[in-house]
Image: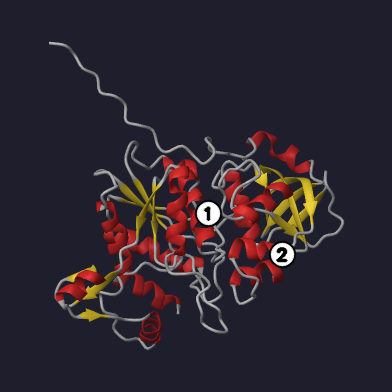
């Protein structure tokens, strides 16, 4: 009888660009690196998110903020100057006219010393061109156009980073390496991105994604909410984090991994969908759930959508093969009195009675202390939201 050996399971998906970047300076060298900086610059909340993701490899293969040639290329065609896919430019902004190429800046944030940036390029961007290229509009009714025109500084800086410490947050953000260590090798890892508390429909959506035809039998879902700055009327990252922690404890589902992403949303529709896929690839995900109108936004003046409902899905699907990832379309689920959550098409075909509760109604019921139906929201999530109100 001949002996047989079992082949090792395939490794996790390779990071974008081939290797996972880690820009953290060894502890023994940090004081010397810090002392080499000529001046201190305070980071905005968005800057701090970008610094963290650069240092831990969330933006692999970038090793610092983009130079102008990469910035220009990404704005013009969602690729770096070398041709590598990238959804949105990663730049450091400042209004300081005295910063020059060659300067070494100690980047600080709320009393912490995050990193040293060696300034290798400095330019004054054409923000209207950036807005049109990245967001498809120059209207300040778009939140990201308003951000780059009203919040970001006059100058952009590109250059390499040396990490010193990560921002201290209420919500601990695992690094890509730490998340990868929790994932099953050789299995599908489905990423679910959100920026709001998770309700029953969301849970049904990402758990059913595990049964999609292109997902392996032993696959898992990584629930990976963004907890950085987002739209002005969104629930704060700290409160959202508390809802996720309580929900993870309540459902105790072994096929779900939970982690938090220190990313500042741009609400850039198709471009943001691509950016999120690249980031999640670096965290070890092979699949990405693309929702209807993902990362979309509306004009606060007219109420019109800036993107079509399937623009993000189509754009992500178009580039998934090049990234080595697969997309999982978001099911349009509704709650019915007869069968619980089913697809809208199924409910229509069977003539089922659909129950609906809008976000506005939900918030009114929360404020009024009314009972929230359990088919809509988890009790644990409601308790956290009521306590924070």
Frontmost residue, 19 versus 45: 19
* Residue at the far bottom in the pictured view: 368
Residue 152 in view (yes/no): no
Please state, as top left, top right, bottom left or bottom right, where the C terminus lies in the image.
bottom left
Q: Which corner quadrant of the image does residue 344 belong to?
A: bottom left
| Neighbourhood count class around disc 1 (C-alpha, 10 Å): few under 14, some 14–19, many 20 upward | many
* Residue that appears at 24% across and 80% down: 355
Frontmost residue, 184 versus 172: 184
The residue tagged 1 is 275
Instruction: Say above or below: 363 vs 181.
Output: below
Sequence order check, earlier mark of 2 and 1: 2
Q: Secondary structure at mark 1?
A: helix
Residue 63 in view (yes/no): yes
* Residue that appears at 40% across and 83% down: 360
Frontmost residue, 137 versus 296: 137
* Residue that appears at 19% across and 14% down: 3
Residue 268 rendering spot, x and y as whole percentages: 55, 64
Q: Secondary structure at mark 2?
A: helix
Residue 211 rendering spot, x and y as whole percentages: 24, 52
The residue tagged 2 is 127
Q: Which mark is residue 339?
A: none
């Amino acid at each position: 009888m001949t002996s047989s050996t079992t082949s090792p399971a395939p490794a996790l998906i390779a990071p974008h660009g081939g290797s996972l970047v880690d820009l953290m300076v060894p502890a023994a060298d940090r004081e010397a690196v810090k002392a080499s900086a000529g001046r201190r610059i305070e980071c905005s909340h968005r800057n701090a998110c970008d610094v963290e993701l650069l240092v831990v490899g969330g933006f692999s293969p970038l090793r610092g903020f983009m130079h102008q040639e990469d910035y220009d290329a990404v704005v013009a065609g969602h690729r770096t100057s070398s041709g590598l896919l990238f959804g949105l430019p990663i730049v450091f902004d400042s209004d300081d006219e005295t910063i020059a190429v060659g300067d070494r800046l100690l980047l600080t944030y709320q009393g912490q010393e995050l990193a040293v940036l060696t300034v290798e390029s400095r330019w004054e961007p054409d923000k209207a061109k950036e807005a049109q290229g990245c967001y498809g509009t120059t209207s300040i009714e778009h939140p990201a156009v308003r951000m780059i025109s009203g919040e970001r500084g006059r100058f952009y800086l590109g250059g390499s980073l040396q990490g010193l410490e990560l921002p201290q947050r209420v919500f601990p953000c695992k690094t890509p390496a730490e998340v990868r260590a929790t994932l099953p090798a050789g299995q599908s890892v489905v990423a679910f991105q959100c920026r709001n508390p998770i309700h029953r429909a969301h849970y049904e959506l990402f758990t059913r994604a595990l049964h999609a035809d292109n997902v392996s039998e032993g696959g898992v879902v990584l629930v990976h909410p963004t907890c950085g700055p987002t739209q002005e009327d969104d629930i704060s990252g700290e409160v959202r984090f508390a809802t996720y922690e309580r929900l993870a404890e309540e459902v105790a589902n072994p096929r779900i991994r939970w982690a938090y992403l220190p990313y500042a949303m741009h609400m850039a529709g198709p471009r943001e969908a691509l950016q999120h896929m690249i980031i999640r690839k670096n965290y070890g995900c092979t699949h990405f759930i693309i929702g209807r109108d993902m990362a979309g936004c509306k004009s606060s003046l007219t109420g019109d959508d800036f993107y079509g409902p399937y623009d993000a899905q189509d754009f992500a699907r178009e580039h998934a093969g090049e990234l080595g990832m697969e997309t999982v379309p978001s099911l349009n689920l509704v709650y019915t009195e007869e069968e619980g959550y089913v697809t809208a098409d199924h409910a229509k075909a069977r003539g089922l009675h659909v129950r609906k509760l809008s976000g506005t109604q939900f918030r009114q019921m929360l404020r009024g202390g009314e009972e929230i139906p359990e088919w809509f929201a988890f009790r644990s999530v409601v308790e956290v939201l009521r306590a924070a109100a």
